[in-house]
C-alpha cells in the first residue's frame, strides 16, 4: 500500500524512515519476521496489525531550530548522528497541520527579527518547537522551547501565531537553558489557553501535558489497548496493577472491567495528569502512585500483597529483574506485557518464562509505519500447579 510516488528529499540525511522505499505489506512482513525470530520460541505470534493509511500518523512532532551558513533560519530534524539541522517543510510521518505551524513559526521569526538558538554559543532565542495534536478532539498544543525566559515581542508574536492558526488551542513557553540534547527544560510558562490538551481514547478523556508520555499513534493505540484488555480476560473482580502507566490511559480504560486498579509511574507530570484523568473519568476504583515500578513492586511483594493481573508497558530499555521477581512473588494469574522494543521484550521473556510464567500468545501492532519500530502485546499466564 506504500505510495510509490512518495519520495522524501531528506530521507538519507534523516534516517528516520528506514523502510520508506519498501511496500507497506513488505514492511509488515519484515516486522512480523523480526518479532517471530525473537519471541516465537516462547509461544504463538499472531499476524501483525497494520494501518489502513500508514502516513501522517504522528500526533507529536518536534522541530529543531538553527541557522544555515547564510544566516537564514532553518527548522526540521537533526541529521543522523549529529546536531546539524536539516531544513524540512513536511514529513510523511507527521501530522500535516503541525508541520504547517512549524513553517509559520519559522517565517515569523524572521519578520519579528528573532534568532534561532545557537548550540555552540548558547545565544539566540528559539531552540525547538514541540506540537501535540489530539486525534479526536482536534486540540493543538504548541510548545516554544527557548534558551532563556526572555521573549521579545511576546504578546504580538502569540497574537500573530493565533491569527494565522486559530486552530491552536494552547501555547506554552518552555525554558531550556542547559547545554543539553534534551528537548524540554524544567520550566513551563503558559502563554495562551490551558497549557495542555485533552484527547479521547477508547471512550475516555485524557489530559496530556507537555512533558507527559502519550502514545504517538492514536489510531493504533486504541487497537493495542483493546488487544491488551482482551488478553487480560478481566471479569470485574480482579485487582490489577498497571506498571509504567504514563498518564493513566490503560488504568482508566481497564477500570470498567476490574475491581480495582493501581497505576505506577516515575514521571511526576504524568502522574499529575493521571490523577486528574481519574477524576474526570470518575474512575473511583483507580489509584496512582509516583514511584519506580521495580521498587514499588518489590515493596508490594514484601508486604505480602497479591494481585490478579499485571499490565506492564516499560520504555524501550524493557523491565528489570527486580520488577519481574516481584511480579513472580505476587503471583498474578496473568501478565500482559506491552512492549515497544522486541529485543528487550525477548530478554525479559527469557527471564520470566523460566520462572513460572508461559507465553500464551502475542501480536505485533504497527505503531510506527515506515520505520523499523514495532509494538508487541504479549499474554503471559501463570503455570498451573
Ligand atoms: N502505558 C502508558 C505509558 C507507556 S511509556 C501508555 O500507554 O501511554 C512508558 C512509561 O514508563 C513512561 O511514561 C515513562 O515515564 C515510564 N517509566 C520509565 N521508567 C520507569 C520506571 N523505572 N518506573 C516507572 N515508570 C517508568
Image (cartoon, rainbow, N blue to C red):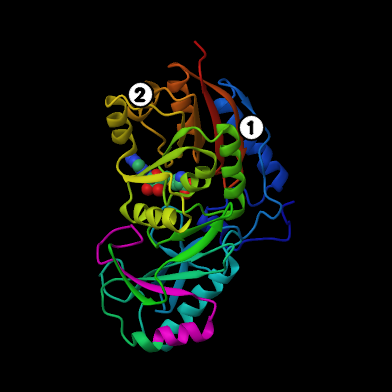
- Read off the residue under disc 2: 325
Mark 1 neighbour density, 10 Å: few (under 14) some (14–19) many (20 or more): some
Q: Residue at x 44, y 27 (%)?
A: 348
Give ligand 1's quarter of the image.
Answer: top left
Compared to residue 152, the image places residue 197 above or below, namely above
The residue stretch that appears in magenta: 157-185
- Dot 2: what SS? helix
Q: Is residue 273 found inside the magenta-colored segment of the image?
A: no
Q: Position of residue 253 (x, y in %)?
A: 52, 47
Q: Position of residue 63 (x, y in %)?
A: 45, 66
Q: Give the number of callouts.
A: 2
Q: Position of residue 356 (x, y in %)?
A: 45, 16
Compared to residue 13, the image places residue 156 above or below, namely below
Q: Is residue 183 found inside the magenta-colored segment of the image?
A: yes
352 to the left or right of 302: right
Tag of residue 33: 1
Quadrant housing residue 154: bottom left
Which residue occupies the foreground of this view, 225 or 147? 225
Amino acid at each position: 500500500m506504500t505510495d510509490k510516488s512518495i519520495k522524501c528529499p531528506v530521507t538519507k540525511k534523516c534516517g528516520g524512515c528506514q523502510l520508506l522505499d519498501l511496500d507497506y505489506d513488505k514492511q509488515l512482513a519484515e516486522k512480523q519476521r523480526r518479532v517471530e525470530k525473537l519471541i516465537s520460541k516462547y509461544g504463538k505470534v499472531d499476524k501483525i496489525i497494520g494501518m489502513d493509511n500508514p502516513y501522517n500518523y504522528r500526533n507529536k512532532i518536534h522541530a529543531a531550530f538553527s541557522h544555515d551558513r547564510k544566516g537564514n533560519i532553518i527548522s526540521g530534524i537533526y541529521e543522523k548522528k549529529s546536531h546539524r539541522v536539516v531544513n524540512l517543510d513536511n514529513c510523511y510521518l507527521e501530522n500535516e497541520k503541525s508541520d504547517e505551524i512549524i513553517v509559520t513559526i519559522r517565517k515569523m521569526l524572521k519578520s519579528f527579527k528573532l534568532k534561532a538558538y545557537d548550540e555552540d554559543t548558547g545565544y539566540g532565542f528559539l531552540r525547538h518547537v514541540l506540537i501535540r495534536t489530539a486525534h479526536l478532539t482536534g486540540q493543538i498544543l504548541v510548545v516554544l522551547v527557548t534558551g532563556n525566559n526572555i521573549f521579545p515581542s511576546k504578546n504580538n508574536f502569540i497574537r500573530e501565531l493565533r491569527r494565522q492558526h486559530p486552530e491552536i488551542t494552547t501555547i506554552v513557553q518552555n525554558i531550556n537553558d542547559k547545554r543539553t540534547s534534551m528537548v524540554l527544560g524544567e520550566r513551563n510558562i503558559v502563554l495562551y489557553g490551558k497549557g495542555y490538551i485533552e484527547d479521547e481514547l477508547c471512550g475516555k478523556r485524557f489530559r496530556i501535558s507537555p512533558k507527559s508520555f502519550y502514545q504517538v499513534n492514536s489510531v493504533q493505540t486504541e487497537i493495542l489497548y483493546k488487544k491488551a484488555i482482551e488478553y487480560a480476560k478481566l471479569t470485574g473482580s480482579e485487582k490489577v496493577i498497571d506498571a509504567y502507566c504514563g498518564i493513566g490511559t490503560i488504568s482508566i480504560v481497564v477500570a470498567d472491567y476490574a475491581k480495582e486498579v493501581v497505576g505506577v509511574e516515575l514521571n511526576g507530570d504524568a502522574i499529575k495528569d493521571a490523577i486528574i484523568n481519574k477524576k474526570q473519568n470518575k474512575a473511583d476504583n483507580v489509584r496512582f502512585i509516583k514511584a519506580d515500578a521495580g521498587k514499588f513492586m518489590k515493596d508490594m511483594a514484601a508486604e505480602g500483597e497479591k494481585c490478579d493481573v499485571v499490565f506492564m508497558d516499560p520504555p524501550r530499555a524493557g523491565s528489570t529483574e527486580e520488577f519481574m521477581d516481584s511480579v513472580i512473588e505476587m503471583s498474578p494469574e496473568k501478565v500482559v506485557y506491552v512492549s515497544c522494543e522486541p529485543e528487550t521484550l525477548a530478554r525479559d521473556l527469557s527471564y520470566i518464562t523460566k520462572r513460572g510464567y508461559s507465553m500464551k500468545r502475542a501480536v505485533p501492532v504497527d505503531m510506527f509505519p515506515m520505520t523499523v519500530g514495532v509494538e508487541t502485546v504479549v499474554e503471559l499466564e501463570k503455570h498451573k500447579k
